[in-house]
Amino acid sequence: MRINVYADETNSTIVTIQEKTIEGHALTGVRFNLPGEKNSVTFWGRQDMVPLLEYAIRQLQRHYEESGQQPVSVPEERHLEDVLER
């Protein structure tokens, strides 16, 4: 399965979903809300999800650096809307 979510479809409404048990495993989710009443993408995992998401961010940063573009730093939460509006 492939899911494409484009930056201009996201907003700063990112929610941590409390633990949920699936097949005996306690998972926590991070949900990115998208335009539309019920549209969202949720990534489920244990603490192993944190290094995976951090690795994905580093991959993006490396791509921008190698292509000569100025990488964007991860903003503090209060500035996230400003970055997403660019």
Image (cartoon, rainbow, N blue to C red):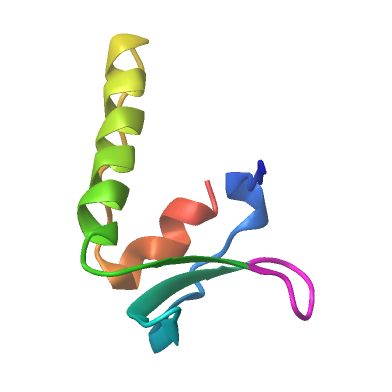
How many numbered markers are drawn? 0
Residue at 35% across, 20% down: 63
Main secondary structure along the magenta-highlighted residues? loop
Name the residue furthest front: 23
Relative vertical location of residue 5 with respect to residue 27 in this rendering, above or below: above
> Magenta segment, which residues?
34-40
**Residue 18 percent location from the top left of the image:** 37, 89
**Residue 54 percent location from the top left of the image:** 24, 48
- Residue 36 relative to residue 19: left or right: right
Question: Which residue is nearer to you in this view: 60 or 21?
Answer: 21
Residue 31 part of the magenta-drawn span: no
Location of the N terminus (image quadrant): top right
Residue at 50% across, 54% down: 84
**Residue 29 percent location from the top left of the image:** 42, 74
Relative vertical location of residue 36 with respect to residue 66 in this rendering, above or below: below
Q: Quadrant of residue 33?
A: bottom right
